[in-house]
Image (spheres, rainbow, N blue to C red):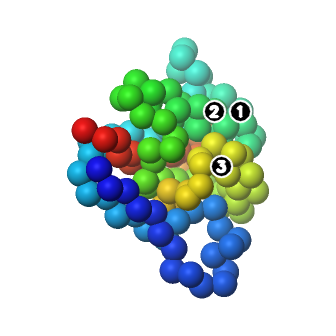
């Protein structure tokens, strides 16, 4: 398997915690549905608290990856859906601690509402591990 995460080499990229793209050859793909801040009883964790919801959502990502035999280091793409981009940007240190460098490619989309009214963020990932 060959995996390469890349940036364009422009000056402003030192401020971001994601790669501009990923190139993968071979390997087994793992696609996780959107993970949100919900406990095992189906209750939203951290109503109104973006930081807690990001942490809880990332732990759900870690849990899903582990079930598929992967880890955060195997993630090549992160899609983020949030109801508040400004609040989400403040969680950059949390994401930097979760994903090792080079960070996965990322798309951030602000939406009016997520699946449950109190969700502030939902994280969808694509990971690749060796066959």
Residue in the image at 31% along x and 41% along y = 130
If you read the primary sequence from the N terminus, does the residue marked by circle 1 or circle 3 appear first? 1
Q: Do callouts 1 and 3 mark residues in contact (Cβ within 8 Å)?
A: no
In-image side of 64 versus 121 (left or right): left
Quarter the C terminus occupies? top left
Front position among marks 1 and 3 = 3
- The residue beneath circle 2 is 56
If you read the primary sequence from the N terminus, does the residue marked by circle 1 or circle 2 appear first? 1
Circle 3 sits in a helix, a strand or a loop, which is it?
helix
Circle 2 sits in a helix, a strand or a loop, which is it?
helix
Determine if residue 107 is in view. no
Gap between marks 3 and 2, in whole Å? 12 Å
Q: Do callouts 1 and 2 mark residues in contact (Cβ within 8 Å)?
A: yes
Determine if residue 21 is in view. yes
Residue in the image at 43% along x and 68% along y = 21
Q: Residue furthest front?
A: 1
Gap between marks 1 and 2, in whole Å? 8 Å
Q: Do callouts 3 and 2 mark residues in contact (Cβ within 8 Å)?
A: no
Residue in the image at 59% along x and 55% along y = 101
If you read the primary sequence from the N terminus, does the residue marked by circle 3 or circle 2 appear first? 2
Gap between marks 1 and 3, in whole Å? 17 Å
- The residue beneath circle 1 is 46
Q: Where residue 95 is drawn, which disc sits there? A: 3
């Amino acid at each position: 398997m060959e995996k390469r995460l890349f940036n364009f080499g422009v000056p402003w990229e030192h401020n971001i915690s994601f790669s501009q793209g990923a190139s993968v050859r071979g390997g087994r793909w793992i696609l996780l549905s959107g993970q949100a801040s919900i406990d095992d009883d189906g209750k939203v964790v951290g109503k109104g608290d973006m930081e807690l919801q990001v942490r809880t959502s990332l732990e759900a990502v870690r849990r899903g990856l582990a079930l598929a035999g992967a880890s955060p280091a195997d993630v090549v793409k992160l899609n983020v859906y949030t109801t508040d981009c400004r609040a989400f940007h403040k969680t950059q240190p949390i994401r930097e601690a979760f994903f090792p460098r080079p960070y996965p490619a990322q798309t951030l989309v602000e939406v009016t509402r997520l699946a449950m009214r109190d969700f502030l963020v939902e994280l969808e990932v694509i990971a690749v591990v060796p066959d």
